[in-house]
Amino acid sequence: MWDTCRKITITTMHGDITYGRPYWYCRDCGHGEFPDDAVYGIDGLGHRLTRAVKLEAAYFAQNQMSFDRAEEVIKRVYKIEVNRETIREIAEDAGTKVFENDSAQAQALLAGIQNIEADKKVTGTVYIMPDGAAVNTRVEDENGSTWRENKTAIAFSSKDMIKRKDGGHIIVRKEIAPLIGTSEEFKKHALRAAVAAGYGKFTDTVVIADGAAWIRNMCDDIFPDAVQILDLFHLKENIYTFSKYLSKDNAQVVRWAENVIDKIETHYAVDEALDCIPVTENLPDGVPNLRTYIENNRTRINYPLFRERGYFVGSGAIESTNKTVVQQRLKRAGMRWSVGGAQALLSLRAKDESKKWYDVEKALA
């Protein structure tokens, strides 16, 4: 039975539209509905915003430094009102859907890892760079800490780069996979990113990382054919930190550190480098056990050979990605997140930086 014409206001990219539509209900069961809503495509329209407005809200939620700033930009650019809380809810919903889709794809790849194409017909290299960066949450762990490690992997191929005149390279396309979770959970996401970049099709696979045990174990598990390289910057950083522990004289610190670096970086004379490093015990916090560090990564520091093969030996790309994806949006002063909310926003930022915003569009279809 038709009852009355009821009005509804929908926010579109062109402003608010208000119109009336008939409301029908059943006297016997009490069920009522607006059949015209389905005709006009607004049935189940959350927040009374069109899909286009939601996509812009999700985009600026991850693109701007805060939800408040996203609200301001949307108002200034499109002359429409979407409050910060609505923007947050839209971003979390969209990001969660994207993350769930990525997780399902990653799980399927891991389950069928033996079926990943391994013809390796394309001459070139797939680079995989994993790393971690902490995010402050609202949940305390058993030790009372609210910080959770976000693990991120980027993957790209030698075909995804252009060479600059100065000899450097610009990465024009990369796949980014972030996860706030365990290393066991993370490995399938790293695999998904690697496959998207061409893992299994290129002749060479290279993993560049900081030497963390969880990364070494992950590589042995899902990238057994990869050449593993210890990021040269991290090696140098640890050598200098240890040198400062040995001496307070700056000139001596530099001489000792550069001597050890030269033996490894230039000559791959690992045993000679180890001979320079004294055996130490009970090192203070922040000072690495350099001998153990080098021994554990002996096969990953053959820089003369790696450079001869044309491989990169630094992981600057993942460091830059962590700053862009994690720090610039989730680690500003005073920011604390729910784990789900942080993961959702990271997933959106990863799609934007990977130039795959169409995955967000599909999730909000």
Image (tube, helix red, strand yellow):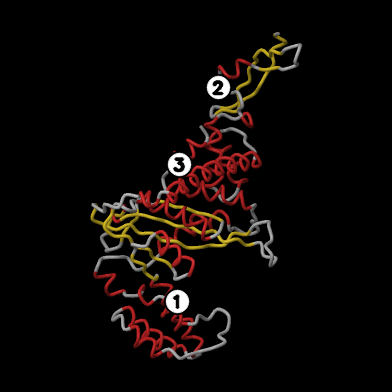
Q: Is residue 44 above or below residue 218?
A: above
Q: Report the disc number at residue 237.
A: 1
Q: Work out whether residue 132 or residue 101 is closer to the camera in this orientation and state it.
A: 101
Q: Which residue is rendered at x = 64% and y = 23% of the image?
A: 9
Q: Earlier in the sequence, mark 3 or mark 2?
A: 2
Q: Report the disc number at residue 41.
A: 2
Q: Is residue 104 above or below residue 52?
A: below
Q: Work out whether residue 249 or residue 330 is closer to the camera in this orientation and state it.
A: 330
Q: Is residue 200 left or right of residue 16?
A: left
Q: Residues within 10 Å of mark 1 (few under 14, many from 20)?
A: few
Q: Position of residue 6 (x, y in %)?
A: 69, 16
Question: Quadrant of the image for the N terminus?
Answer: top right
Q: Is residue 1 left or right of residue 212?
A: right
Q: Quadrant of residue 316?
A: bottom left
Q: Residues within 10 Å of mark 2 (few under 14, many from 20)?
A: few
Q: Which residue is rendered at x = 45% and y = 91% of the image?
A: 278
Q: Which residue is rendered at x = 68% and y = 57% of the image?
A: 139
Q: Which residue is mark 3?
A: 357
Q: Position of residue 228 (x, y in %)?
A: 36, 67
Q: Amino acid at mark 3?
A: Trp
Q: Residues within 10 Å of mark 3 (few under 14, many from 20)?
A: some
Q: What is the C-alpha distance between the residues marked 1 and 2?
A: 58 Å
